[in-house]
Image (cartoon, rainbow, N blue to C red):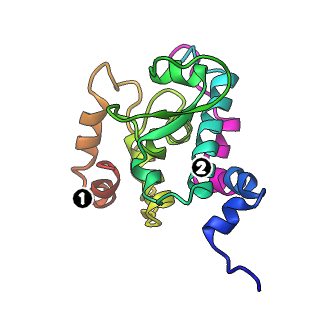
């Protein structure tokens, strides 16, 4: 008799790694890392090795969830990840040396699940700074399948030159939300 399809049956299949790499990179959008650039002055440590390490962390995380038949909630609050020395140094995780990836326990750290993976944080940011709006939209689109509507065409962008010099990003977003049309979406996106 044929075994019914189950996640654990899939995990035994050698194609599980391919599923993690292809499905995971499409679903979580970390394949966009390949084309992302960062402002070299603000982020001098962002190089191709770090970019590849970020991608591999998330691939291994997705593959682990599939192979071990873990809870889907691990995508949100899994207190572990997979890092090499380069990524561990970037995250400030001590006692990791060498280029090989290994599972690390993140209990007691602010990191948990894919929302704190460098791959996700990078694809949901601008080249010069983080973006609560892009990140909130990414969560609504990718994890909650509840995309916000497109912004109205006449909504002005934030004043990038003022961020950090005249007003904080938080202050600009608070002012932006005073417009009722903008507030309807930003009330959902910004807290995420």
Residue drawn 70% across the image and 37% down it: 34
The picture places residue 146, in percent across and down from the top left corner, at 43, 66
Q: Secondary structure under badge 2? A: helix
Q: Within the image, what quadrant is residue 110 found in?
A: top left
Q: Secondary structure under badge 1? A: helix
The picture places residue 69, in percent across and down from the top left corner, at 55, 60
Residue drawn 47% across the image and 24% down it: 91
Vertical comparison of 19 with 107: above or below: below
Whichever of labels 2 and 1 marks the residue nearer the N terminus, that label is: 2
Residue drawn 32% across the image and 48% down it: 190
Vertical comparison of 43 with 102: above or below: above
- CB atoms of marks 2 and 1 within 8 Å: no
Q: Within the image, what quadrant is residue 176 found in?
A: top left
Is residue 31 left or right of 95 when viewed as pictured? right
Residue highlighted by disc 1: 180
Viewer-nearest residue: 40 or 2: 2
Q: Is residue 114 magenta?
A: no
The picture places residue 15, in percent across and down from the top left corner, at 77, 58
Q: Is residue 33 magenta?
A: yes
Question: Few, some or many C-alpha atoms within 10 Å of disc 2 (few <14, some 14-19, many ≥20)?
Answer: some
Residue highlighted by disc 2: 64
* Quadrant placement of the N terminus: bottom right
Magenta highlight range = 23-42
Viewer-nearest residue: 182 or 42: 42
Q: Within the image, what quadrant is residue 58 found in?
A: top right
The picture places residue 64, in percent across and down from the top left corner, at 59, 49
């Amino acid at each position: 008799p044929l075994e019914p399809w189950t996640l654990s049956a899939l995990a035994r299949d050698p194609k599980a790694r391919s599923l993690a790499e292809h499905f995971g990179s499409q679903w979580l959008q970390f394949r966009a890392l390949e084309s992302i650039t960062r402002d070299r002055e603000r982020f001098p440590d962002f190089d191709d090795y770090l970019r590849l390490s970020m991608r591999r962390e998330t691939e291994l995380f997705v593959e682990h969830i599939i192979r071990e038949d873990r809870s889907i909630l691990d995508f949100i609050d899994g207190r572990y990840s997979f890092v090499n020395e380069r990524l561990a140094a970037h995250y400030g995780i001590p006692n990791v040396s060498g280029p090989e990836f290994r599972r690390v326990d993140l209990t007691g750290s602010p990191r948990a699940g894919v929302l704190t993976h460098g791959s996700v944080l990078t694809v949901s940011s601008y080249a010069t700074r983080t973006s609560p709006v892009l990140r909130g939209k990414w969560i609504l689109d990718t994890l909650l399948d509840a995309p916000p509507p497109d912004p109205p065409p006449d909504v002005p962008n934030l004043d990038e030159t003022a961020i950090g010099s005249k007003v904080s990003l938080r202050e600009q977003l608070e002012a932006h939300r005073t417009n009722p049309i903008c507030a309807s979406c930003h009330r959902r996106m910004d807290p995420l």
